[in-house]
Image (cartoon, coloured by chain):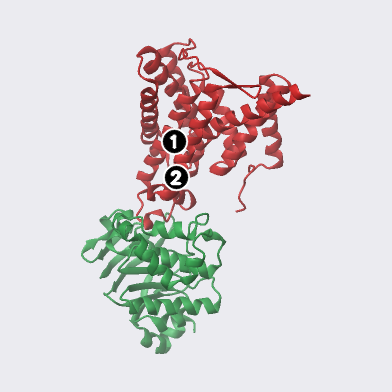
Chain colours: A green, B red
Amino acid sequence: MLALKSVRADYTTFQALFDVSLEVRQGEAVGVIGPNGAGKTTLMRVVSGLLRPTGGSIVMEGVDLVKTPPHRIVELGIAHVPESRRLFPRMSVEDNLKMGSFMRAARPKFRRRLDVVYELFPRLRERRAQLAGSMSGGEQQMCAIGRALMSEPKLLLLDEPSAGLAPVVVEQVFDLVTRLRAAGLTVLIVEQNVQQVLRVVDRAYVLKAGRIRAAGAAAELLASDTIREAYLGI
Amino acid sequence: MAIFDIFLLEALLNGVLLGGVLALLSLGLNLIFGVIDVVWICYAELIMLGMYGMYFLYTVYHAPIVAAAAVCIVAVAILGVLLHVLVIAPLLGAAPINQLLATGGVLFFLQSAATVLFGVEFKNLGLRLPVLKAAGMFISYSRLLAFVAALVGMVLVYLFMTRTYTGTAIRAIAQDRQIIPLMGVNSRRIYLVTSALGGGLAGLAACLLVLQYDVHPFVGLSFGPITFLICVLGSLGNFVGGFVAAFVFAEIIALGGLYLDLEWGYVFAFAFFIVMMFVRPEGLMARRS
């Protein structure tokens, strides 16, 4: 479904990704794990078009994402839940969700998708008129994921969905990933919360200092002593 | 005492009427600042051109006044888009001071161009609207008309901003510019729509102001500074703040004008602004960040 080949990304002062190749197949949940500053967020940003790679190719179902304007990428079925949620804080929950169906193809389906999202997160229905910025971190994370689901994506990119949340809420977020997969969504998830993410994904890549250092089935990575010691710190 | 009360009421009412027009003026500027993050220093000069448009269409070419107004609003909206495409867009990544200097340059360009093209004489529509007399008060019909039209304009903008996808995106982009492509929004298109809207509001303001004031190349100086002060007092980019500040300013001007001269009303309003900048430098309606 999504394939990255030898992707390279630079910020003005340093290089963030070196020769990163990665693949996500239809229906899979794939994790990217690694320490802070490894380039995980950069990886998400080059896929969704927020940052242009300086080399390599990114292809989604045969379409070259590097040549697609950033605001067109969501139309290909890629929805990105950015790091630290990035809701529109002074807009209501429902207006935030409305922004999730901004693209032309999603507008006629707005009501139906709203029901789907409210079904998934009943709390959001209760708070639909509330300003998004006034909710708790967990509720905001639900709203951010809900906003991404409004476009009825094929591939969901989750960037550190558990960051800054209470342990109970973290459980809920990972449960949700399992439920979304069961509903047929493909998920690429970036996390520092290694042990928990490896329980919900099929495969994972270990990213460190901008390079893929290891890859494999989630269970194998959890079991491998060298990987645990060298990269996961557990 | 009864006579005095009538004058006070009349002044308060005139303040409200002035406030509506000032609120309309500040809305356009606030919209541009909130969404595109630049200040159109030449905003009042767009209004000046719109006033000339009304003068030529209505007084010189005898077009029906409503048709003239519609043409002016659209024409100034197009000027807003041109301003964005030709001056603002190339400078979006530049330092704020460069953007200020560029739009400031446009201000002088438009003033000089108007002087060359139209001369320095004061022109007016030659339209005399009646003065209404009600409950012992005199209310100018043109002010009342301007107030109602400004209010209608603002309600239309409010509905556009809250009911449509494009309007919602305009509000969203003002809150988080960076992630806006993730929503499938082309920010360049939103900037063009916003510039057209800001220009259209300037055009509407021109149609209303030309009913009350003569037009000349430097007429922008009468509205420009006070519009900026209102926007700053209401916290630049905050639509509700600008709305409230417009009425506060207008009442100070109207009441100052009642007890002394109209000029003193402006002196009090500007003095109030300076004091407020010491007391609440972030504006009346500052958000906690």
Query: Crowding near pointer 2: few (<14 within 10 Å), some, many (20+)?
Result: few
Q: What residue is shown at x 44% (from left), y 46% (from top)?
A: B161
Question: Which three-letter amino acid code belongs to the residue tagged 1?
Answer: Gly
Q: Residue furthest left?
A: A62
Residue A33, image x and y in percent?
42, 75
> Residue B128 location, x and y as percent?
50, 14
Say whether marks 2 and 1 touch (CB < 8 Å): no
The image quadrant where one finds the N terminus of chain B is top right
Spatial distance from mark 2 to mark 1, Cα to Cα?
15 Å
Label 2 SS: helix
Inspect this view and state whether residue B132 appears. Answer: yes
What residue does disc 2 label? B159
Q: Residue at x 59, y 42 (%)?
A: B241
Residue B107 sits above or below residue A168 on the image? above
In this rendering, position of residue A165 left or right of residue A147: right
Q: Amino acid at mark 2?
A: Leu
Front residue (pair A69, B275): B275
Q: Position of residue B49 (x, y in %)?
A: 43, 22
Residue depicted at 52% across the width and 64% down the height: A127
Above or below — where is B13 with respect to A201? above
Q: Say whether residue B270 is visible.
A: no
Mark number displayed over residue B47: none
B71 and A152: which is toward the camera? B71
Instruction: Categorize mark 1 by other alpha carbons within 10 Å: few (<14), some (14-19), many (20+).
Output: many
For the residues tagged 2 and 1, is the chain the same? Answer: yes
- Counting from the top left corner in percent of width and height, residue B38 is at 48, 39
User: Which is more N-terminal, label 1 or label 2?
Assistant: 2
| Residue at left offset 54%, top offset 79% | A168
Residue A43 versus residue B71 in the image, above or below: below
**Of the two numbered discs 2 and 1 in the rendering, the one whose residue sits closer to the viewer:** 2
Q: Is residue A224 above or below residue B38?
A: below
Residue that carries the numbered disc 1 in the rendered image: B198
